[in-house]
Amino acid sequence: MSTSTSASAITTVIGLEVHVQLRTRTKLFCSCTVEFRPEDPNSQTCPVCLGLPGTLPVMNRHAFQLAMTTALALNCSISHETRWDRKQYYYPDLPKAYQISQYDQPFSSSGWLDITADDPQQPARRIRITRAHLEEDAGKNLHDESGRGGDSRVDLNRAGTPLLEIVSEPDLRSAGEARRYLESLRALLLFLGVSDCNMQEGSLRCDANVNLHIPLADGSTAATPIVELKNMNSFRNVELAIEYEVRRQQQQWQKTGQRKGDVPKQTRGWDAEKNITFSQREKEESSDYRYFPDPDLEPVLVTAAEIETLRAALPETPVARRQRWCSTLGLSEYDADVILDQGPEFAVWFENVQRLCGDGKTAANWVTQDILRDLKATAMSLQEFPITAEILGTLLKCVVGERITTKSARDIYAELRLRAEQSGQPVDVTQIEQIIQERQLEIVRDTAALDTAISAAMAAKPDAVRDFRSGKQSALGPLIGMIMKQVAGADPKQVRERLISAVNSGE
């Protein structure tokens, strides 16, 4: 058996399991709150989520509705009857020694999510969703990692938190595709409002299953053992971990030439400091968890009318919004993605600006450059930022309507921000008109005044006129500057066009 297969002939096979904390007030089967409070461990627990004898779980209906909303947005089929199962395993952070989950009859299955291909010129890649099911979260083990042999502790505040597990088919073919899948999924979840998707707080977690399909000389294909990657706390780390694991499996194959089954499947952790994966344990199979139906919970029955009501209430997805912006507002895909990446609140803010000014491209340019830059520099939220969508939209309407120049608009924008900073009070939209009048920023329509200023500038700087006529384009700069000073509110574009015409005509 040959082991010299080229890397380009090897197929990378990736499937992702994404755990999403649903945005509910209470846990999945009890009334404990789900606030993120690491400073106060074990303060959000009760006999139900602690698994004390004699307690009975009661399903959180809101969590189930959020889960169905997500599954519908992922184009899944919704089951009219779903049942709960007990997943048996013991970790210190699982007080019941089992997790209530769904196995035989999940509430949804057979969906899909489209992502861009590695080559942007290629059609979108459709990634199939095997299932999305509900389950409760475990607690959190806290270990002393100082190396001094300190204690390990358990915080059970998370135990019982509602999780939606979204399992993809192994359709992803690169680390880049895996990252884009996660980015697209996160954007969808945020626009649906079902989760805050905060990875630092554990609201969005991802495990990646990775292996390689390697063509052999005899025409058959060998597969490396599936490795499940864990401990990845950012999309970038997911991408890095997969890239490393692909290289590791390729190197192992070149050394050993092992066929599938020669070594067991395994779970590996990701070390973000060393940028390597490391072995944790052999990977469990479903039979290892000894699933059986939970005897304390009734099946959940869903009618066709309930499904259609949730489907009708689905908001516009990020993909649909991007397509609409590009086709009707003239935005580039890049600008649309920059805006969408900021989340639903920012997208609505942009649309309000666009609606007021009447030009999508102008609104996008300002929002993706000036607004994002200043939000980042000031570390402000949109609610705190002194320039509201109404103010920016009104200001840009003056630009679109050619009442003021873009340069004047930037001067007004800077003045409004300065006033807000100095007064500590929000600025008012009426101040735009006030500044225009005070500084005489309205574009001059009197071409006679412009022509007089142009003639005076040409007479004052004959050398610049000669240099331009000889081909030196930069020679116009001093002339334009002189004209702009003489005629307040002059449009630089108009000044340049009339100046060139005058120079070329020999006036």
Image (cartoon, rainbow, N blue to C red):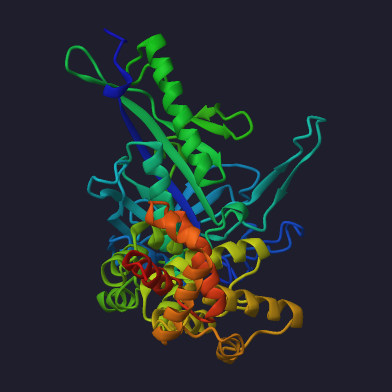
Q: Quadrant of residue 310?
A: bottom left
Pick the quarter of the image with the C terminus: bottom left
Location of residue 299 with respect to 236 vertically, above or below: below
Image position, residue 183 (x, y; %): 43, 53
Q: Nearer the viewer, residue 130 or 367?
A: 367
Location of residue 500 with respect to 221 vertically, above or below: below
Q: Nearer the viewer, residue 354 or 199?
A: 354
Image position, residue 305 (x, y; %): 27, 79
Q: Quadrant of residue 421?
A: bottom right
The total of numbered circles placed on residues is 0
Image position, residue 380 (x, y; %): 65, 68
Q: Nearer the viewer, residue 239 or 427?
A: 427
Q: Residue at left 49%, top 68%? A: 480
Residue farthest left in this picture: 219
Camera sees residue 2: yes
Pick the quarter of the image with the N terminus: top left
Q: Nearer the viewer, residue 334 or 212?
A: 334
Q: Residue at left 28%, top 75%? A: 303
Image position, residue 316 (x, y; %): 34, 72
Q: Residue at left 43%, top 83%? A: 397
Determine whether, in the image, residue 141 is placed left or right of residue 455: right
Camera sees residue 265: no
Q: Quadrant of residue 334?
A: bottom left
